[in-house]
Amino acid sequence: MSPASAPDPASPIGNTAAIASGAALVRVEHLSKEFPAGSTGIIGGKKLSIKAVAGVNLEIAPGETIGLVGESGSGKSTLGRLILKLLEPTEGAVYFDGRDLSTLGRAELRALRRQMQLVFQDPYSSLNPRMRVRSIVGEGIEIHKLARGAEKERRIAELLAMVGMSADAMDRLPHEFSGGQRQRIGIARALAVNPRFLVLDEPVSALDVSIQAQIINLLQDLQEKLKLTYLFIAHDLRVVEHISNRVAIMYLGKLVEIASRDEIYLNPRHPYTRALLSAIPTIDTAHRPERIKLPGEMPSPMNPPAGCAFHPRCPYAKDVCSSVEPKLETGRGGHAVACHVFPAP
Ligand code: SF4
C-alpha cells in the first residue's frame, strides 16, 4: 500500500486550500443525533436519550480521505449515515458541494444522493443472497436511468473489471464468492451510479488481514482513477494509516483529535489516540509504543460523564477533567485536540 499524498491540512475541520476557497465537498456543522433511549432510559423519572453524535464539525476536501476512527459505539457509523442523509440530524447541517441537504426537495435530494454512496462493513449480509451480481450492480443504474439494455450490460461488466472481477461473475449469486470478492461487488454497486463521495463503513473489518490490504489498495486505485472523496470509518488505526490524508478520532459522539495522517501517527496528543495507537500490533519491537490499557468500557452515550467524557478511563486525568469539557482547539498545521493536559501543538 502506498501512503496517500496528503492535501495540506491547516484547520481542525478542513483542508486549508479547499476551505479557503469555499470548495470543501462535504461540510458538517454542529451535527448532532439523539435517539430515544426506550424504557431502560429513565433515571429519576427523567427520560434520557442516546447522544450518538454531539456537535461535530468537519470538512472534507475533494479527493481527500479522512479516516474516522473510534471504538464500537463512538458514533462514527451514525455520523457517516447523517452525512449521507440516511438519518435525520437532531441538530446541525450537512452541506454537499455547498448545498445544504436539509433545504433540498425530494427530486433534488435524490439527484444529489446519487453522488454520495455507502459501502457497508459486512460483505456477507449487505448483498441480497437471492439477487445475481448483474442485478446487484445494475440496480442503481436502473433506478437512476443511467443506461439500458446492452449499454447497461456493458457498464456492469466495466464496473466489475474496475474492481478486479470478470464479467462471468454477473450470472452468479453472492454465496458463490469469498468475502473479499463480495466486498468488491459491494464497491462496484456503489460505483455504478458515478458517485463523487463514498462513506466506507468499516469496509475491511470482516476480512482477513491479507485481503484487507488488497481491498485498501483497490480503494486507493479507484480514488485516483475516479477522483473520489472518502470518509473511511474504522475501529482500528492500523487500517486507515495508508489510505488517509487526515485522521479524525471519535469518542462518545465527539471528535477529540483530528490532524494529518503523519501528525496522528508520529505526534499523537490525545490520550485516547495514544491508547488506540499503542494497541496496534507491530513486529518492530524497538519502536513499539508502550501498551496503554484503558480501564473499563466506553461509558453509555445515554449518560455521558461530565467534563471530559474520557476522564473515567484516562491515565492523565486531573481534577479539572471531571468538571470542565475541553474544547477542540486547533494548533500548528491544523492539528486539533480536545484535552486540558495535552493541548494542540
Ligand atoms: Fe484525559 Fe483530561 Fe485530557 Fe480528558 S482532558 S483526555 S481526562 S487529560
Image (spheres, helix red, strand yellow):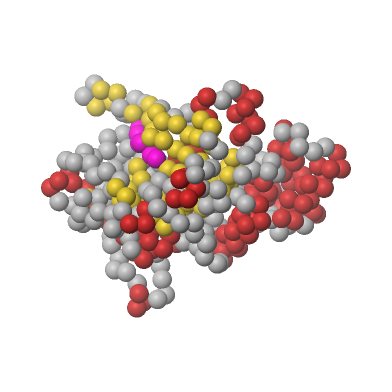
Q: Position of residue 75 (x, y in %)?
A: 40, 41
Q: Where is residue 253 in the image (x, y as percent from the top left)?
A: 36, 40
Q: Main secondary structure of the magenta part?
A: strand
Quadrant assignment for the C terminus: bottom left
Is residue 127 placed above or below 268 in the rendered structure?
A: above
Q: Is residue 188 left or right of residue 52?
A: right
Q: Where is residue 289 in the image (x, y as percent from the top left)?
A: 32, 69
Q: Where is residue 130 in the image (x, y as percent from the top left)?
A: 71, 40
Q: Is residue 188 left or right of residue 341?
A: right
User: Which residue sits at x=39%, y=40%?
Assistant: 57
Quadrant assignment for the N terminus: bottom right
Front residue of this view, candidates 287 and 7: 7
Front residue of this view, candidates 294 and 177: 294
User: Which residue sits at x=30%, y=27%?
Assistant: 48
131 magenta-colored: no
Q: Which residue lies furthest to the front in this view?
A: 21
**Picture quarter containing residue 38?**
top left
Q: Residue furthest left?
A: 319
**Picture quarter containing residue 139?**
top right
Q: Can residue 78 be seen in this view?
A: no
User: Which residue sits at x=82%, y=45%?
Assistant: 153
Q: In this view, does 187 lie to the left or right of 323?
A: right
**Range of residues picked out in magenta:** 50-57
Q: Can residue 288 be seen in this view?
A: yes
Q: Which residue lies furthest to the right in this view?
A: 150
User: Which residue sits at x=64%, y=43%?
Assistant: 195
